[in-house]
Image: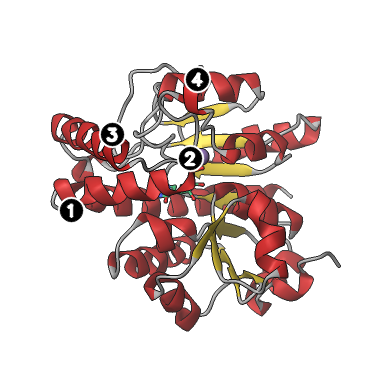
């Protein structure tokens, strides 16, 4: 029994009770990261990718003041379509629940809820991190602090979002003691870009090898999560020059409009999706689904070892 026992959908509760693999999925990318109807399609495809790999998907959100772990298709649709859905990081959870509000959960909130409910594997698109010019703005995502305290969790992603200061984000993860494993890569991917050229020290080449690292991390009791990063599939990777131009344009536009704080990431993603005529969006969807699949494959390996 824990605070979220009643929040868990029956199929997920059953899987957890029997030590079967479960993968949690965040909802901010549905409500704020992708436009309708591609967001709903992505949410459905991610869940299907988890099932196809032999695990149970657990999409997490807050509906009418209640944490929900596992959403029905009607609830997924509501989250994808509604325009009054809040974006909740970990610190927003208590006020959102107390106020009976509906919110999508970011990496930090989702990871915290998932771990509290006993779900140890999580998948997303790109992590939040240190924003450009953070030295003046202090804009550093709570995602990093949650990664530092999410003991024993595995987080599968495509690195951090290109809109961030990536070398600084890597440094911040190092400071917090968060190990990063490249999945079939020796460099940090940056979301829709296959590489940043920033070297990673650790690499694994299949799900069993990744599971082995997580198992050792858990056994030793080293604090924090393990991050597993993979590149966007080659066939869906957009042209880097076009993406960089779109990013510069989006950053300048955000500057002109004075958009900062938690509104910044959704604004930049939407603007880049627009100016690349969907190219970045196609890549964004592809990497999210691929990460859900990889997370499930590692979750299956972990369950086999338990
Ligand atoms: N990855 C995506 N799309 C997103 C996000 C990540 O592909 O929308 C979200 C995640 O939920 C992440 C959040 O936790 O952006 C970070 O927001 P901020 O930079 O405001 O901390
Ligand atoms: Mn921020």
Give the mark, 2 or 1, whose residue is nearer the N terminus: 2
Residue drawn 21% across the image and 30% down it? 244
Say whether mark 2 is within 8 Å of ligand 1: yes
Badge 3 crowding class, 10 Å Cα cut-off, few under 14, some 14 to 19, many 20 or more, is: many
Q: Nearer the viewer, residue 54 or 9?
A: 9
Please, is residue 211 above or below residue 111 in the view? above
Residue 153 position by quadrant: top right
Give the mark, 3 or 4, whose residue is nearer the N terminus: 4
Q: CA distance from mark 1 to mark 4?
A: 32 Å
Give the mark, 1 or 4, whose residue is nearer the N terminus: 4
In the rendered image, residue 124, in percent from the top left (x then y), is placed at 47, 49
Could you say whether the residue bearing mark 4 is in a helix, strand or loop?
Answer: helix
Q: CA distance from mark 2 to mark 1?
A: 21 Å
Left or right: where does residue 270 sit relative to residue 93?
left
Q: Which residue is mark 4?
A: 135
In the rendered image, residue 67, in percent from the top left (x then y), is placed at 66, 69
Q: Which residue is mark 3?
A: 193
Q: Nearer the viewer, residue 54 or 141?
A: 141
Q: Which residue is mark 2?
A: 127
Colouring: secondary structure
Residue 152 position by quadrant: top right
Discs 1/4, front: 4
Could you say whether the residue bearing mark 1 is in a helix, strand or loop?
Answer: loop
Is residue 303 among what the camera can see? no
Q: Which mark is residue 278?
A: 1
Q: Which mark is residue 257?
A: none
Q: Nearer the viewer, residue 27 or 19?
A: 27
Q: Nearer the viewer, residue 260 or 12?
A: 260
Give the mark, 3 or 2, whose residue is nearer the N terminus: 2
Please, is residue 134 above or below residue 257 in the view? above
Give the mark, 2 or 4, whose residue is nearer the N terminus: 2
């Amino acid at each position: 029994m824990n605070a979220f026992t009643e929040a868990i959908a029956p199929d997920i509760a059953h899987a957890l009770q029997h030590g079967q693999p479960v993968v949690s999925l965040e909802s901010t990318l549905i409500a704020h990261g992708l436009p309708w109807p591609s967001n709903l399609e992505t949410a459905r495809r991610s869940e299907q990718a988890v099932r196809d790999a032999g695990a149970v998907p657990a999409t997490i959100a807050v509906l009418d003041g209640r944490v929900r772990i596992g959403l029905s298709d009607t609830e997924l649709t509501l989250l994808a379509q509604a325009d009054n859905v809040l974006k909740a990081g970990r610190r927003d959870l208590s006020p959102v629940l107390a106020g009976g509000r509906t919110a999508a959960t970011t990496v930090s909130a989702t990871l915290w809820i998932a771990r509290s409910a006993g779900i140890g594997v999580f998948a997303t698109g790109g992590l939040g991190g240190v924003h450009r010019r953070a030295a003046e703005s202090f804009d550093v995502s709570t995602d990093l602090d949650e990664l530092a305290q999410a003991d024993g969790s595995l987080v599968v992603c495509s690195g951090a979002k290109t809109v961030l200061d990536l070398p600084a984000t890597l440094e911040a993860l190092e400071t917090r003691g968060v190990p990063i494993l490249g999945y079939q890569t020796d460099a940090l991917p940056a979301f829709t870009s296959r590489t940043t050229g920033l070297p990673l020290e650790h690499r694994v080449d299949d799900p069993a090898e990744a599971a082995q690292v997580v198992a050792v991390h858990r056994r030793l009791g080293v604090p924090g999560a393990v991050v597993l990063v993979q590149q966007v599939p080659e066939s869906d990777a957009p042209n880097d020059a076009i993406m960089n131009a779109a990013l510069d344009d989006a950053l300048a536009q955000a500057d002109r409009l004075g958009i900062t704080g938690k509104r910044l990431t959704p604004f930049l993603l939407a603007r880049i999706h627009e100016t690349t005529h969907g190219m970045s969006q196609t890549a964004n969807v592809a990497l999210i689904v691929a990460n859900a699949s990889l997370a499930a494959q590692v979750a299956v390996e972990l369950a086999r070892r338990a």
